[in-house]
Image: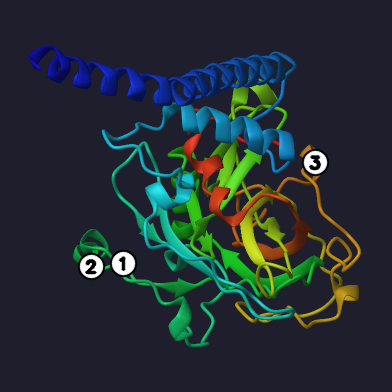
């Protein structure tokens, strides 16, 4: 009787072992296959990097490599839950914003900052175009964190007029005069490498280069040409006054209505615009003015950085202030990058911000 009772648990254990054996083998095979796929993925990514694939571009290949590198860095918790997008992990509660055709998309002006000093400035402290009088719509008002409240930072609209999927060529914005103390102050800001920061759909503006494989937030006020490189007696200072904005977006009617913004880039240009014999009121918005008055800024043109036309930060021959024509252009580009992956390029790391930017 006792021997029979002992054999019963043994038989039950053997029965359970037989039942679980196939599932254990299947699980082992699945893990083995997963390791093979991971190894193949690692080889593929290594080959892409060896071939010179950048990680900052908006192409499918760049996004794939960027996502792979970031997910390798992501720390997993003790409990493995279902896989979530990187945006959901880093920015919980954030939700995409959809925009309709032709809808205004406000770009906000942030602080002007430098890594060389701890003293920030407001965007409108600079000699730039006046702040728009439009009120910020409730949907675009952001909740400020404690640091922003203590520092007294306020949300300010930038002077750029941007509407969904409406690209525009060179558009004159306004004319300002910079002279005296303001001119000397601007040279100091350039020398200390201050950068201007804007945001669009909560994305900080990026200045990126696929060729150099870097992406940095914000754009410099200008740049300095050393006397040793120009052959002149003193260093020369130049400022950026034309801005090429590139906005990438994703459109998927089967998933959502309208478009979702996935990228916000800027390419700054320094150009001494030509102004025909026309009187321009300082600070007046010129966006709807006739383009014939500005030969270097027409709807069909796109200014480029040329040493011969750089805008130098210096007063006139008789000591008068310099006149600056600000302009901008907007290019909307469709992209396959999902909204959840739009932050990846900000997280892959950037080189030291002390890189001098020349186009």
Left or right, 280 with respect to 184, comes to: right
Vertical side of 255 occupied by 22: above or below: above
Q: Which residue is mark 2?
A: 149
- Residue 163 placement (x, y as % from top left): 69, 75
Q: Give the SS element for disc 2.
A: helix
- Residue 290 placement (x, y as % from top left): 86, 80
Instruction: Name the residue located 35 percent from the left edge and 31 percent from the top edge.
Output: 75
Instruction: Name the residue located 23 percent from the left edge and 67 percent from the top edge.
Output: 149
Q: Which residue is mark 1?
A: 153
Q: CA distance from mark 3 to mark 2?
A: 42 Å
Vertical side of 323 occupied by 164: above or below: below
Q: Give the SS element for disc 3.
A: loop
Q: Nearer the viewer, residue 290 or 87?
A: 87
- Residue 309 placement (x, y as % from top left): 79, 46
> In what quadrant of the picture does the N terminus appear?
top left
- Asked if labels 1 and 2 touch by Cβ distance under 8 angstroms, the answer is yes
Dividing the picture into quarters, in which one does residue 121 lie?
Answer: bottom left
């Amino acid at each position: 009787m006792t021997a029979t009772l002992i054999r019963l648990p043994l038989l039950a254990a053997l029965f359970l072992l037989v039942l679980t054996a196939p599932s254990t083998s299947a699980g082992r095979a699945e893990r083995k296959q997963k390791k093979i796929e991971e190894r193949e993925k690692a080889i593929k990514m290594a080959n892409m990097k060896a071939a010179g694939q950048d990680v900052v571009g908006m192409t499918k290949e760049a996004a794939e490599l960027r996502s792979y590198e970031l997910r390798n860095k992501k720390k997993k918790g003790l409990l493995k839950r279902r896989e979530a997008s990187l945006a959901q992990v880093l920015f919980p509660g954030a939700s995409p914003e959809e925009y309709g055709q032709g809808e205004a998309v406000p770009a906000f002006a942030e602080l002007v900052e430098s890594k060389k000093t701890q003293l920030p400035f407001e965007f409108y402290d600079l000699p730039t175009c006046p702040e728009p009088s439009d009120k910020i719509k409730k949907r675009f008002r952001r909740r400020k964190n404690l640091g922003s409240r203590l520092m007294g930072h306020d949300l300010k609209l930038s002077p750029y007029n941007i509407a969904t999927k409406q690209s525009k060529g060179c558009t004159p914005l306004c004319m300002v005069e910079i002279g005296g103390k303001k001119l000397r102050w601007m040279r100091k800001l350039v020398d200390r490498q201050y950068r201007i920061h804007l945001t669009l759909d909560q994305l900080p503006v990026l200045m990126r280069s696929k060729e150099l494989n870097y992406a940095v937030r914000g754009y410099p006020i200008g740049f300095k040409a050393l006397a040793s490189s120009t052959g002149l007696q003193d260093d020369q200072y130049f400022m950026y006054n034309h801005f090429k904005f590139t906005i990438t977006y994703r459109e998927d009617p089967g998933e959502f209505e309208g478009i979702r913004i996935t990228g916000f880039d800027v390419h700054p240009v320094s150009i001494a615009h030509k102004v025909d014999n026309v009187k321009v009121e300082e600070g007046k918005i010129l966006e709807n003015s006739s383009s014939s008055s500005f030969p270097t800024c027409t709807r069909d043109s796109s200014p480029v950085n040329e040493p011969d036309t750089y805008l130098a930060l210096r007063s006139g021959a008789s000591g008068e202030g310099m006149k600056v024509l600000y302009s901008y252009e907007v290019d909307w580009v469709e992209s396959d990058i999902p909204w959840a992956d739009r932050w990846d390029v900000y997280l892959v790391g950037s080189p030291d911000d002390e890189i001098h930017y020349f186009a």
